[in-house]
Image: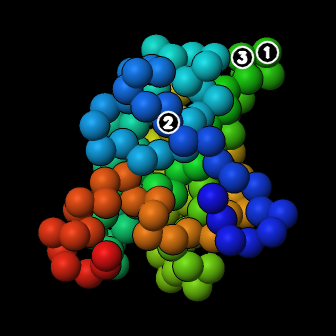
Amino acid sequence: MSDRPNEPQAATTPPASEGTPQPGRNRPHWDLEDTHPDKVEELIKGLRTVVDPEIGLDIITLGLVRNVRLDADKNEAVVTMILTTPFCPYGPALLEMARQKAEQLLGVPTAIEMGTEVWDMSMVEDGELLKKWGLWW
């Protein structure tokens, strides 16, 4: 939970007893998981190739992809993303690379929507990774 009042909370992946998440997964639940579960793993794998060059981690590991929606009726997809900082010099490039990769994998025109959440280190997929780096926690 956030200390910020009125801030929307992202749903997190349910515990193993409630679904099929893999250990170390700390990412929000995507609408795509409910509507097109067969596309989720391939999309995750593809989006892992989009790497923030300053940090050296991919956008899935960093927790930057907050939601993915696929509207088959409209034949379009929307990827909701945030950046680690609003001043990220690679932000526009990361957003465009993510859009292109999602469009390629989902096979429909794809748009990027900027999320309103403020990124923090708790959004990193595997907190143990940060401990190994000795940077946080």
Earlier along the polypeptide chain: callout 2 or callout 3? 2
> In front: 33, or 44?
33
Q: Which residue is mark 3?
A: 72
Give the label, 2 or 1, closer to the camera: 2
Is 86 located above or below residue 22 in the figure?
Answer: below
Contact? badges 2 and 3 (CB < 8 Å): no
Contact? badges 1 and 3 (CB < 8 Å): yes
Mark 1 Cα-neighbour bin, 10 Å: few <14, some 14–19, many ≥20: few
Tell me if I can see residue 129 in this picture.
yes
Q: List x then y, in percent, for residue 77.
A: 67, 33
What residue is shown at x 56% (from left), y 69% (from top)? 119
User: Which labelled disc corresponds to residue 73?
Assistant: 1
Q: Which residue is mark 2?
A: 13
Earlier along the polypeptide chain: callout 2 or callout 1? 2
How far is mark 1 from mark 3, CA to CA?
4 Å
Q: List x then y, in percent, for residue 108.
A: 62, 27
Badge 1 amino acid: Asp
